Image (cartoon, rainbow, N blue to C red):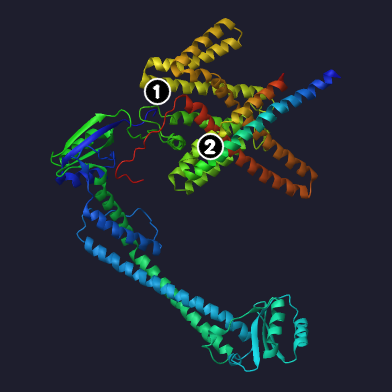
């Protein structure tokens, strides 16, 4: 629990004839974390392995499959089953894929063509429909010797009778048609050519937007009829589009399992075919290097020997540094690995702090928020959300939050707070420690937790340091800080000589261990411990926030009448905000106390994640 | 007269202790925060490192807070 899984380094070598057997064996087992082979410059014996030819063929098909999947909107339901490694009908599958692909490309082209025609029709309709609303024949818009015409929209706010008056002041030889179309004013003007320019000026002064009739020269006859033709064509095309889309959907339904199964299948084959790129090969042999959990090694070795008729060389060495790290924690503690990974994975051989985080993270969180009502409510909320989500990481966060809610409820009982009040529906809660009345006790508690936490970190650091660099380094660099605190306490208690002496000695030890830098860092231990006073400060702030919400609501309630409604709104909104803030800031502060104050005492991190070949999550 | 002045001056002293240290922390966090957001935009893995660096100066406020409490408590 406190240490990552023990790994051993394995080297597997053999003739090329059994390479594929070994590779698929490891793929199915899913326990080997492969160390990528990089070819040294001076050594020409071993080259990087070559992927199988099948792999490159398959990747082309896979690309096609994925594009089909996207176009047909096929959603992966449950994993897709992997059929077999050697499929005799690979060629058939390939042909089938090409066939589906061709069908889809064809359908997509057709749909695109229909869409284009539809937008063209729409544009035509936009021109014909307003003219049709004027009730004019299409043929009036031809070339005249003495007449000019203008067709278009006038803005809504233009007064037509006023416009007419202005028009008649220019010329009497004018004919105007006017109609409303889709909430806009459509006009058509016929005017003698001499006055055309003046009329145009008047029109543009009134923000006239002309309709371009040029593109409709192909039409003849009454505009009503033209409109009808356009509309008929439009419905026809829409139906065609619907039909094409339906056909696509049918295609998707028909082939969805074929596509999903083959996609899973191909991905596996490609992964298998390309893995030689990660290990070393000579003309006739291959060498795979990697890491396997120690507990799995013996059974793995026996099985692999059996599979390859003993034609394989397997060697294992004890892992030292640089081994990939697989954390090993019980189910309840596991979600907290997320918080560790957020910082950095432990390096191999150092203590995995997940369990400590499991103990103290919810504790600090609960100490800060501490409200029975908030705790119970959010616990239920997170539980419900957790049953709905599927992403593993979000699930972990929610589990962590549920632990935090639980501790919030526990501290709610200690502090006697229920949604900021001291009563649960009339029943008075007797607080064990009243936060607002005894803030100094609260502060002392917080600092006390800090002392314990920081020294816990130092002790883990002592263990890590002893393991890595021996007892002397551990005493000089970690134990010295604890002595320093003892000296400080003695000094504070009034025992000047002993206190000063111990502090001096530990300062010298720190200087020996960490160099001059350590000497300058001496006051940091005080800063680290005082940093835990935030537990009390953030806690008080959240308690007071809830109290203020209740008081404001209380004032509204006592006013009666509309005040009851306002009070309810204040209660709901206020407590929602208080809960939101109450989760955001304790979460960040609790995280910070771990990452900065706790981890810096012992944590190295930078471990490589254990990702075995063939494992699917 | 003198006795009456003690209480308000203590209160002001406490307010100054926490107020000024809060402003100091804010100035420090402003600079770090901008840089951190820039770094996170480049590489999202730096989120936690950025967060830690950004919240480091908070300790300054806490010192002010503790001092303010001591002033008021005395």
Mark 1 and 2 residues: CB-CB less than 8 Å, in contact? Answer: no
Q: Quadrant of residue A192?
A: bottom right
Pointer 2 residue: B51
Q: x%, y% of residue B72?
A: 72, 22
Instruction: Please say whether residue A449 is visible from this viewpoint.
Output: no
Q: Where residue A530 is drawn, which disc sits there?
A: none
Tell me what residue is drawn at x 31 percent, y 41 percent: A612
Q: Does residue A236 lie above or below A9 as drawn?
A: below
Q: Quadrant of residue A405?
A: top right
Q: x%, y% of residue A227?
A: 56, 85
Q: Which chain is disc 1 placed on? A: A
Category of crowding for the residue at label 2, using alpha-carbon neighbours closer than 10 angstroms: few (below 14), some (14–19), many (at least 20): some
Give the position of the C terminus of chain A as an image quadrant: top left
Tell me what residue is drawn at x 43 percent, y 23 percent: A460
- Looking at the image, the residue that sits furthest to the bottom is A145
Pointer 1 residue: A464
Q: Does residue A496 lie above or below A616 as drawn?
A: above
Under circle 2, the secondary element is helix
Q: Along the line of sight, which residue is nearer the eye, A329 or A393? A: A393
Q: Which chain is disc 2 placed on? A: B
Distance from the alpha carbon under mark 1 to that under mark 2: 26 Å
């Amino acid at each position: 629990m406190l240490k990552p899984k023990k790994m051993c380094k394995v080297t597997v070598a053999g003739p090329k004839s059994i390479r594929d057997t070994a590779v698929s064996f490891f793929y199915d087992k899913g326990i080997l974390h492969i160390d990528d082979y990089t070819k040294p410059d001076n050594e020409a014996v071993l080259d990087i392995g070559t992927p199988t030819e099948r792999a490159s063929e398959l990747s082309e098909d896979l690309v096609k499959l994925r594009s089909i999947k996207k176009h047909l909107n096929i959603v992966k339901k449950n994993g897709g089953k992997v059929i077999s490694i050697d499929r005799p009908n690979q060629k058939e599958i390939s042909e089938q894929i090409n066939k589906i692909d061709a069908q889809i490309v064809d359908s997509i082209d057709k749909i695109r063509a229909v869409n284009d025609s539809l937008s063209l029709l729409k544009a035509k309709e936009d021109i014909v429909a307003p003219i049709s609303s004027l009730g004019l024949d299409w043929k009036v818009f031809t070339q005249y010797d003495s007449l000019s015409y203008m067709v278009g929209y006038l803005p809504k706010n233009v007064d037509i009778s006023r416009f007419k008056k202005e028009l008649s002041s220019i010329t009497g030889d004018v004919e105007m048609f006017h109609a409303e179309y889709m909430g806009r004013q459509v006009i058509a003007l016929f005017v003698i050519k001499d006055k055309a320019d003046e009329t145009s000026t008047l029109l543009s002064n009134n923000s006239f937007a002309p309709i371009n009739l040029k593109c409709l020269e192909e039409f003849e006859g009454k505009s009503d009829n033209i409109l009808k033709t356009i509309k008929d064509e439009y419905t026809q095309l829409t139906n065609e589009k619907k039909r094409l889309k339906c056909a696509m959907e049918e295609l998707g339904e028909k082939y969805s399992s074929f596509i999903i199964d083959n996609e899973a299948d191909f991905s596996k084959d490609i992964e298998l075919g390309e893995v030689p790129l990660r290990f070393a090969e000579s003309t006739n042999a291959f060498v795979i290097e990697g890491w396997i959990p120690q507990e799995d090694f013996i059974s793995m070795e026996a099985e692999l020997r059996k599979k390859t008729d003993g034609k394989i060389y397997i060697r294992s060495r004890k892992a030292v540094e640089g081994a990939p790290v697989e954390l090993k924690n019980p189910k309840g503690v596991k979600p907290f690995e997320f918080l560790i990974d957020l910082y950095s994975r432990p390096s191999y051989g150092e203590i995995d702090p997940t369990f400590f985080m499991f103990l103290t993270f919810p504790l600090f969180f609960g100490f800060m928020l501490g409200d029975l009502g908030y705790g119970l409510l959010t616990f239920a909320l997170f539980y419900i959300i957790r049953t709905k989500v599927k992403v593993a990481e979000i699930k972990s966060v929610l589990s962590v939050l549920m632990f935090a809610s639980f501790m919030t409820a526990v501290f709610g009982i200690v502090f006697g707070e229920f949604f900021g009040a001291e009563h649960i529906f009339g029943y008075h809660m007797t607080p064990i420690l009243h936060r607002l009345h005894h803030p100094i006790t609260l502060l002392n508690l917080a600092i006390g937790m800090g002392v314990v936490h920081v020294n816990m970190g130092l002790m883990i650091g002592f263990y890590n340091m002893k393991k890595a660099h021996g007892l002397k380094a551990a005493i000089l660099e970690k134990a010295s800080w604890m002595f320093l605190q003892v000296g400080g306490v003695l000094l504070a208690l009034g025992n000047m000589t002993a206190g000063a002496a111990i502090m001096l000695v530990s300062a010298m030890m720190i200087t020996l261990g960490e160099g001059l830098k350590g000497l300058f860092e001496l006051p940091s231990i005080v800063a680290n411990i005082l940093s835990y006073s935030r537990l009390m400060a953030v806690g008080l702030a959240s308690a007071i926030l809830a109290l203020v919400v209740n008081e404001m609501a209380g004032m509204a309630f006592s006013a009666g009448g509309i005040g009851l409604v306002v009070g309810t709104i204040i209660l709901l909104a206020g407590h929602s905000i208080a809960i939101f803030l109450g989760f955001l800031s304790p979460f960040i502060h609790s995280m910070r106390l771990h990452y900065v104050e706790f981890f810096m005492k012992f944590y190295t991190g930078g471990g490589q994640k254990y990702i075995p070949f063939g494992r699917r999550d | 007269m003198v006795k009456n002045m003690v209480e308000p001056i203590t209160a002001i002293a406490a307010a100054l202790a926490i107020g000024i240290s809060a402003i100091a922390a804010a100035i420090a966090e402003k600079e770090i925060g901008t840089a951190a957001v820039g770094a996170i935009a480049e590489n999202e893995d730096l989120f936690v490192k950025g967060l830690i660096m950004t919240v480091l100066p908070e300790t300054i406020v806490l010192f002010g807070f503790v001092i303010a409490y001591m002033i008021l408590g005395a």
